[in-house]
């Protein structure tokens, strides 16, 4: 099964930590959506498998007008066989959860909301320059449920400077009390050229230590597992039967098409492509029917390395079945030479290697040792 990703590159304001592609020039959304629909229709023949998931991400798709969201949804239905689609996710921000928006999203077939709560504390939300406040964070899930949404995932951020561990625990407990079926939690990372990087470099903000981050991560893992969530990927937790279909397919190497500026696509085999990360260039190129994307062909080694990188951050681990003899033997050699302190973190069978969730924060170090040259 394949997936469709649509990147909506607009946000109300810039979060301090964000390095995704977006613009705050929301007034240009009509032109962008027009170009995006042209891209969808022109690439209709690129997917041969049935589609199982559609993901509207960004950016902030929840700030699009109803008219523009409808245009995108109708164009996808017109261009692809969506009869077998199980999951249609829209990324939404708590301040966009008006009754009108929620009802409209439901009416166009959205059946899962991914809500960017991040924290229930006003001080954190201000620090991260989020557009919503703590009241909206606390109320947005109930509003979505009232509108009939059964599948809800919320995002949290840990490692926030100046947040105490008690506050983090309270954030996780509030998330649990909302009775959603999925939670994603990401560590606040300092990406270069962001406002957060500037604050850290100018010593106005001090990053949390590795020990503090590990402690918050382990607390998150314990609290959520105790509440019936399965920790199935480093940043993702699901109640029974509620794992994210779109992301799970992506981690398993299934094909997907990405539309919109900066969106990536993969043919499920060896070809990866990515669209230009600039709204004006994207619109111009689509209008003038010139190129708006670049692509690459993955070698066997690169494909194996991608499987190692995504697999070792998932409970399923990495399956070494289907690799060439030379890749398998180099991987085996890397495993043999790995320092014991890291190797002890692995579960190794004949065909599979995985890391226990408690050790996923060490995945980068483990992956570095296992990568195929
Ligand atoms: S809402 Fe999301 S995409 Fe937009 S600036 Fe904030 S983190 Fe980035």
Image (spheres, grey):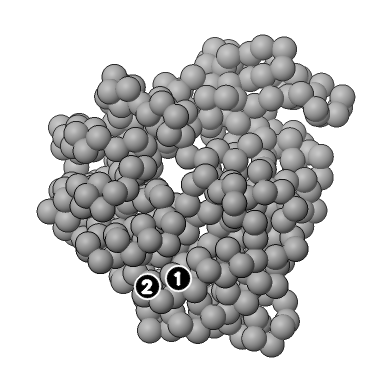
| Crowd class of label 2 (few under 14; some 14 to 19; many from 20; radius 10 Å) | some
Left or right? Give the position of 91 relative to 78: left
Residue pointed to by mark 2: 66
Instruction: Kindly indicate whether the residue at mark 2 contacts the one at mark 1 (C-beta within 8 angstroms).
Output: yes
Quarter containing the N terminus: top right
Asked if residue 367 shows in the view, the reply is no
The x, y position of residue 296, in whole percent, is: 76, 57
Q: Report helix, strand or loop for mark 2.
A: helix
Residue pointed to by mark 1: 70
Left or right? Give the position of 241 relative to 159: right
Asked if residue 267 shows in the view, the reply is yes
Residue at left offset 76%, top offset 19%: 333
The residue nearer to you, when weighing 126 against 51, is 51
The x, y position of residue 307, in whole percent, is: 67, 35
Quarter containing the C terminus: top right
The x, y position of residue 355, in whole percent, is: 53, 21
The residue nearer to you, when weighing 98 against 307, is 98
Q: Give the mark count.
A: 2
Picture layout, residue 193 above or below residue 117: below
Picture layout, residue 236 above or below residue 271: above
């Amino acid at each position: 099964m394949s997936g469709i990703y649509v990147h909506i590159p607009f946000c109300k304001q810039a979060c301090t930590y964000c390095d995704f592609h977006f613009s705050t020039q929301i007034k240009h959304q009509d032109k962008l959506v027009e170009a995006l629909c042209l891209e969808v229709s022109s690439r209709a023949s690129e997917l041969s498998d049935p589609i199982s998931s559609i993901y509207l991400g960004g950016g902030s798709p929840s700030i699009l007008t109803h008219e523009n969201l409808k245009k995108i949804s109708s164009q996808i239905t017109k261009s692809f066989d969506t009869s077998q689609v199980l999951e249609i996710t829209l990324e939404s921000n708590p301040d966009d959860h008006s009754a009108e928006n929620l009802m409209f999203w439901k009416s166009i077939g959205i059946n899962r909301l991914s809500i960017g709560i991040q924290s229930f504390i006003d001080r954190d939300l201000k620090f991260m320059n989020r557009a919503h406040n703590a009241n909206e964070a606390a109320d947005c899930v109930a509003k979505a449920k009232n509108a009939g949404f059964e599948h809800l995932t919320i995002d949290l951020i840990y490692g926030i400077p100046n947040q105490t561990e008690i506050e983090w625990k309270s954030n996780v407990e509030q998330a649990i009390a909302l009775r959603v079926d999925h939670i994603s939690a990401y560590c606040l990372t300092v990406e270069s050229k962001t406002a957060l990087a500037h604050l850290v470099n100018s010593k106005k903000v001090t990053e949390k230590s590795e020990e503090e981050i590990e402690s918050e991560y382990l607390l998150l893992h314990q609290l959520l597992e105790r509440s019936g969530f399965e920790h199935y990927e480093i940043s993702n937790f699901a109640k029974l039967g509620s794992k994210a279909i779109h992301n799970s397919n992506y981690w398993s190497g299934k094909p997907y098409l990405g539309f919109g500026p900066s969106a990536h696509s993969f043919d499920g085999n060896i070809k990866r492509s990515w669209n230009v990360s600039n709204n004006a260039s994207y619109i111009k190129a689509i209008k003038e029917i010139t190129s708006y994307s670049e692509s690459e062909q993955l070698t066997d080694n690169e494909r194996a390395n991608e499987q190692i990188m995504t697999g070792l951050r998932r409970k399923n681990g990495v399956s070494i079945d289907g690799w060439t003899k030379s890749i398998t033997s180099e991987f085996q050699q890397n495993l043999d030479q790995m320092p014991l302190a890291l190797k002890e973190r692995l579960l190794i069978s004949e065909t599979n290697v995985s890391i226990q969730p408690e050790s996923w924060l060490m995945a980068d170090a483990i992956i570095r040792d296992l990568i195929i040259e």
